[in-house]
Image: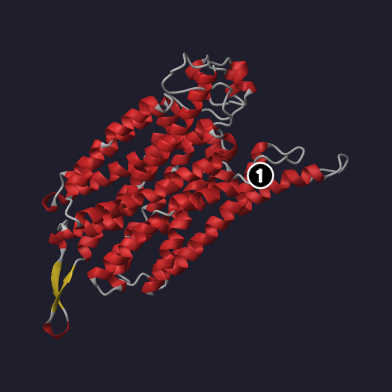
Amino acid sequence: MLGCEGGAGLRRWLTLVTGLLECLCFAGVVFGWASLVFVLKTEGYFSYLCVNIPGVNGMQFLDCSGQDEQFSLIFTIASFMTNFLLLPNGFLFDRFGTMVARLLGISLYTTGALFVAFSSSALSSLLFPALSFIAVGGILFLVTNTQIGNLFGSTRSTVITLYNGAFDSSSALFLIIKLLFEAGISLRASFLFLAACGVIHLVRTFLLLPRTHIPYPLPEGYTYGVKSCGQAKTFSPEQAAANGNMQRDVVTEEMPFNKETAEKVATFWECFLSKFFIWHLVWLSVMQLRHYLFIGTLNPMLQRLTQGETSLVSTYTNAFAVTQLCGVLCAPWNGLIMDRHKGKPRTPGVSEKEADLRASVLSLTLTALQCVLFSICASTPFLPLQYLTFILQVLNRSFLYGGHAAFISIAFPPCHFGKLYGMALSSVVSLLQYPCFILVKGVLGGDPLYVNIALTLLSLLAFIHPVCVYLHCRDPAARRGKPKDSPSS
């Protein structure tokens, strides 16, 4: 029996480490788009849209704004599809479990990698479905790995934010592809290798992850994956309820559905229409729009600030990609902020959920503050300052997505995590990045100052969410502090 427990502990750590590597190497590669754009321009993708236009003194110069628009549109569509399809994918994950969601993600990711591998300057349009497939497949890797935090109860938020930090850092993969390209390794070879890695994802799906979900709180004796020490321990409905396990999907996997238990959990629509969810959606959407526009327009911004000097553009593009590697180092700090109360005695009458919500207020506020500072630096047309912009961007993005996943897992029932994490409405907001790009290129003559100022002011809306959470947590505390015979307000 001791050997079984040791094997289960080893499996959990293998699941944690391999999941971290999967997120670090594959999940969020699309956010390194600026590095890949540099390679694609060198390969001549959409080069037919570059035209010679007359300049001063009869000189002509090459205008590639049409090419930049296509690259921006590809990233806009990919980021939109990532969020828009997260809602149906969340339903799929919540209803059918980990294995089905991962098989879909692996199929999409592998197909997207093959599309890029067999694209060319003559088949530039293949990039539109390719990047969307890679983006959607990658986010499914993240969603199915996030539940691994449930295996480590006292550090659950730290693990969740660590995985989201790894997701951020994976954008550096396109930098590696860029450096390999400059060393003579073709784009096709790199993406064929990515496609072949689908075999690794399949092996991990069948050996190191559950068929459905990892419950929280974790029942005693819970096992998953390959059963090397006999069958998994099953639980009666009464035992599951005693463990605080309210996940309908886990109930359906190992025991009959318990209607009484399910009725205690808020419905999806109650969660969706709640004040918490709506303001969390605003918090996420305004900051996400700022990041998407920055990443999608980074290459033309650097072209403008460097007056088109290719070596400088390459240097700053590499610097941006290198800073993305720090996401996996930054994100756990957010988790530590959210887990800082764990292991300490709670105030009498304070539930674990209420304590978690209180701890999240500081995280939500810091994330909003980081976004405002990042947006101010990004709005300043001073080239050396962009190094600081890159640092603030990766810090804020790692806090944003890690905090987003952790807050959803804290504030809402686990059985709705996949659907609520999807937040399809935020994808509609992310579509605004392309009109902003067209506005800058057209009406504003390439100067993004006014759009940047507007986005900075818009990002101030993110502060409303932590204020609402703080007020929510303060009210029960105030009620507990009243004498029993005092009139209620």
Residue 468 in view here = yes
Q: Quadrant of the N terminus?
A: top right
- Quarter-wise, where is residue 302 in the image? bottom left
- Quarter-wise, where is residue 211 in the image? top left
Task: From the viewer's perspective, tell me whether residue 389 is left or right of residue 310.
Answer: right
Residue 405 in view here = no
Give 101 or 38, whichever is nearer the viewer: 38
Where in the figure is residue 356, as x and y percent of width and height? 63, 42
Say which amino acid is labelled 1: His
The image shows residue 392, relative to residue 228, as above or below, that is below
The image shows residue 436, relative to residue 12, as above or below, that is below
Which residue: 57% across, 18% down? Answer: 259
Which residue: 40% across, 67% down? Answer: 387
Coloured how?
A: secondary structure
**Which residue position is annotated with label 1?**
341
Outermost residue, bottom direction?
57
Task: From the viewer's perspective, tell me whether residue 297 is left or right of residue 478.
Answer: left
Which residue: 46% across, 64% down? Answer: 374
The image shows residue 318, relative to residue 94, as above or below, that is below
Q: Residues within 10 Å of mark 1 (few under 14, many from 20)?
A: some
Where in the figure is residue 244, as x and y percent of width and height? 62, 26
- Quarter-wise, where is residue 316 in the image? bottom left
Give 206 or 416, whichever is nearer the viewer: 206
Give 98 or 152, whichever is nearer the viewer: 152
Outermost residue, right direction?
485
Where in the figure is residue 209, as x and y percent of width and height? 42, 28
Which residue: 23% across, 41% down? Answer: 193
Where in the figure is residue 290, as x and y percent of width and height? 42, 59
